[in-house]
């Protein structure tokens, strides 16, 4: 019999680290702002040709909302959590690199698709929106990969 | 999701044997978050060799008192 029985697992419930909270924030914000953008722009596509659809301003709003939402949300969550786990450690950095690698792979694949669109000389609308979509999918997928690494098994 | 590691550890038992050291205290000693200590304890994260030595040093035991790797079955 073990002379030192292991303590109960009751102390395993801990709040998320600062980095994990920010990853959740990003994983929610990016799809929300991207869907809001496409919710505004796609209906316009049914009303007029792609070359006449105004998309740059809504896209800038979506990008701006993501950036501002990430910064403000990160501050609010840090204040609300009020814990001592604000610092990131080596595991956070490894998980960040893991997620970024996945996001970059998707973005690289998408960049090839956008290059093909440019070669076909399609309207700017399709090139700009394909880039935006690929960026959103890559960022979201990368964040989901990070969350899976935080919640599940991650061996670098 | 990554494959589970074959490396096992006795961190939980060693913490208990060392005055019921908390995960937070061990985390502070090796310079990581408490969540990382939990992930290592549960075999969900493999620490670097350097961190493994730091954990062993925190308990003042040799490395293989903390981490074990099973013999091949065949």
Image: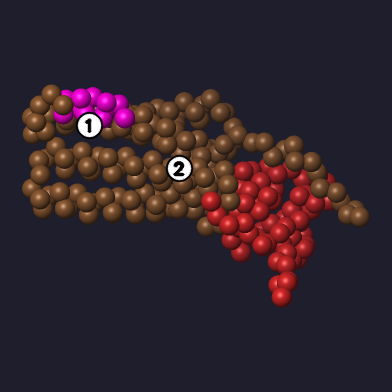
On the image, which quarter does residue A1 sit in?
Answer: bottom right
Residue B70 higher or lower than A61, as above or below:
below
Specify whether A104 is left or right of B60: left
Image x and y of residue A146, in percent: 48, 46
Gap between marks 1 and 2 measured at Cα: 23 Å
| Chain B tint in image | red
On the question of residue B62 being in view, the answer is yes
Q: Which residues are magenta?
A: A35-45
The residue positioned 10% from the left and 26% from the top of the image is A48
Tally the numbered discs.
Answer: 2
Q: Look at the image and say whether residue A41 sits in the magenta stretch.
A: yes
- Label ID, residue B51: none
The residue positioned 30% from the left and 50% from the top of the image is A107
The residue positioned 62% from the left and 51% from the top of the image is B44
Relative depth, front residue between A53 and A94: A53
On the image, which quarter does residue B3 sit in?
Answer: bottom right
- Is there a contact, CB below 8 Å, between mark 1 and mark 2? no
- The residue marked by circle 2 belongs to what chain? A
| Chain A tint in image | brown
Under circle 2, the secondary element is: helix
Label whose residue precedes the other's in the sequence (1 or 2): 1
Quarter the C terminus of chain B occupies: bottom right
Specify whether A13 is left or right of B60: left
Image x and y of residue A152, in percent: 58, 47
Q: Look at the image and say whether residue B73 sits in the magenta stretch.
A: no
Local crowd size for mark 1, using a 10 Å CA cut-off: few (<14), some (14–19), many (≥20): many
Relative depth, front residue between A33 and B72: B72
Report whether mark 1 lies on the same chain as mark 2: yes
Question: Which residue is identified by label 1?
Answer: A59
Question: Which residue is identified by label 2?
Answer: A144
């Amino acid at each position: 019999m073990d002379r030192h029985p292991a303590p109960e697992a009751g102390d395993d419930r801990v709040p998320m680290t600062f980095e994990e909270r920010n990853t959740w924030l990003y994983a929610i914000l990016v799809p929300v702002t991207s869907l809001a953008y496409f919710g505004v722009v796609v209906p316009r596509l049914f009303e007029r040709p792609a070359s006449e659809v105004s998309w740059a301003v809504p896209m800038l709003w979506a990008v701006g909302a993501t950036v501002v939402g990430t910064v403000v949300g990160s501050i609010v969550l840090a204040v609300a959590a009020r814990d001592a786990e604000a610092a990131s450690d080596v595991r956070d950095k490894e998980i960040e690199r893991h997620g970024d690698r996945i996001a970059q792979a998707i973005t690289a694949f998408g960049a090839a698709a956008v290059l093909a669109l440019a070669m076909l000389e399609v309207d700017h609308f399709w090139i700009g929106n394909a880039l935006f979509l690929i960026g959103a999918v890559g960022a979201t997928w990368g964040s989901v990969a990070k969350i899976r690494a935080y919640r599940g098994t991650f061996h670098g | 999701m990554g494959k589970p590691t074959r490396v096992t550890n006795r961190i939980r038992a060693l913490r208990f044997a060392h005055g019921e050291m908390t995960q937070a205290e061990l985390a502070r000693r090796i310079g990581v978050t408490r969540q990382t200590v939990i992930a290592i304890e549960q075999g969900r994260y493999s620490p670097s060799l350097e961190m493994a030595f730091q954990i062993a040093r925190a308990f003042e035991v040799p490395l293989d008192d903390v981490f074990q790797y099973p013999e091949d079955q065949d």
